[in-house]
Image: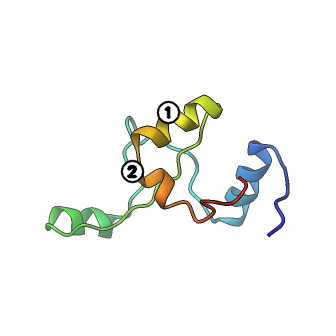
């Protein structure tokens, strides 16, 4: 697969304009972006998956997050490829 290089703001703008992603929110301070149905499921004891993509401030930040959160590594569909 060919990778096209672009700035983060260009990449996120494409996703926002296409309706593929929500605007960035802080999970710590804003809460997770959920629907009323997901909130109700959670309150009823269900466990709906809500996927989050973390952005990194630097290569050092990426390494620190991935060291602390193994799922950030094993869920990566490009693991083992040059990325």
Secondary structure at numbered mark 1? helix
Q: Is residue 69 left or right of residue 12?
A: left
Q: Residue at x 71, y 65 (%)?
A: 18
Label at residue 17: none
Q: Is residue 83 depicted above or below 7 in this figure?
A: below
Looking at the rendering, which quadrant does residue 28 occupy?
top left
Give the residue at mark 2: 32
| Residue on which the image places disc 1 | 64
The structure residue drawn at horizontal position 63% and vertical position 60%, both measured from the top left corner, is 80
In the rendered image of this protein, does residue 22 appear above or below residue 59? below
Q: Residue at x 31, y 66 (%)?
A: 38
Residue found 69% across the figure and 60% down from its top:
81
Question: Image quadrant of residue 45?
Answer: bottom left
Q: Residue 51: horizontal and vertical position, in percent? A: 44, 60
Left or right of residue 39: residue 65:
right
Q: Nearer the viewer, residue 54 or 58?
A: 58
Q: Earlier in the sequence, mark 2 or mark 1?
A: 2
Please tell me which residue lies in front, 11 or 71. 71
Front label number (2 vs 1)? 1
Q: Is residue 19 left or right of residue 35?
A: right
Q: Is residue 39 left or right of residue 33?
A: left
Badge 2: residue crowd in 10 Å (few <14, some 14–19, many ≥20) = few
Which x, y percent locates residue 69?
A: 41, 45
């Amino acid at each position: 697969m060919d990778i096209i290089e672009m700035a983060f703001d260009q990449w996120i703008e494409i996703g926002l304009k296409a309706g593929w992603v929500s605007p960035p929110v802080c999970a710590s301070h804003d809460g997770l972006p959920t629907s009323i149905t997901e909130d109700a499921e959670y309150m009823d004891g269900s466990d709906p998956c809500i996927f989050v993509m973390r952005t990194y401030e630097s290569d050092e930040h990426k390494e620190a997050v991935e060291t602390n959160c193994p799922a950030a590594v094993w869920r990566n569909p490009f693991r083992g490829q040059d990325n």
